[in-house]
Amino acid sequence: MSIDNWTFEMTAIGFETLTLLAKALGIGLLLAVPVGPIGLLCLRRSLTLGMAAGMAVGLGAATADAVYAGAAAFALGVAAPFIAGANWLGVAGGIALIAIGLKDILHRDAPPAPPTLRGHMGVYAGVVLLTMANPATVLTFAAIIVGLGLVPDMASMLDGLVFVAGVFLGSTAWWVVLS
């Protein structure tokens, strides 16, 4: 292989990775934007205790989103060779996204009680646990990955890590704005 071919291959790999990162940033941002119970908690803490307190809530939620995005990405990455070319899976993912959206619209939950832990790290840990108490989030990420046809993009460990980092950064961007 010549140097020119190697450069071309690295450029193509880099572009695909950047494209996946951009998609993951968008997914993280769009999933964080709807102001639900955690968003209200973030706003309340930001208004009463300052931006750092609100960011502790937001980073807790972003961390939980990243954990669930990682679980979905790595599970689908393992399954990718077995489900390659399964168009029905994209349709099923789209239907699952619609069902999750309708459930969220029709069934509003009451805001959670604020974490009683002291300090920003305590609030962060409490919000991570509070957010992870909703395991439907991992199904949402799985449905999005499948629905957007990202399963082939999750074929390597690097791709999965890029996806998780993008979701975390996209979600964090929203929490910075909200705080």
Image (spheres, rainbow, N blue to C red):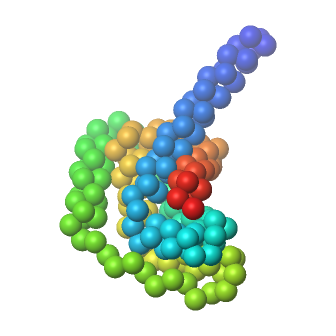
Residue 111 location (% of width, % of height): 39, 78
**Could you tell whether 85 is left or right of 69 in the image?**
left
Residue 10 location (% of width, % of height): 69, 24
Image quadrant for the N terminus?
top right
Q: Nearer the viewer, residue 65 or 58?
A: 58
What residue is at 51 percent from the left and 73 percent from the top?
44
Q: How many labels does the image show?
A: 0
Among the 4 quarters of the image, the one containing residue 57: bottom right
What residue is at 27 percent from the left and 57 percent from the top?
101
Q: Nearer the viewer, residue 14 or 64?
A: 64
Residue 76 location (% of width, % of height): 46, 51
What residue is at 57 percent from the left and 76 percent from the top?
48
Q: Note whether residue 9 is visible.
A: yes
**Could you tell whether 87 is left or right of 46 in the image?**
left
Q: In this view, does 164 lie above or below 26?
A: below
Among the 4 quarters of the image, the one containing residue 148: top left
Residue 96 location (% of width, % of height): 27, 55
**Could you tell whether 3 is left or right of 165 in the image?**
right
Image quadrant for the C terminus?
bottom right
Q: Residue furthest right?
A: 3
Q: In this view, does 19 lie above or below 40?
A: above
Q: Which residue lies furthest to the bottom in this view?
A: 116
Q: Residue furthest front?
A: 48
Q: Nearer the viewer, residue 160 or 59?
A: 59
Q: Nearer the viewer, residue 8 or 179?
A: 179
Q: Note whether residue 167 is visible.
A: no
What residue is at 52 percent from the left and 59 percent from the top?
178
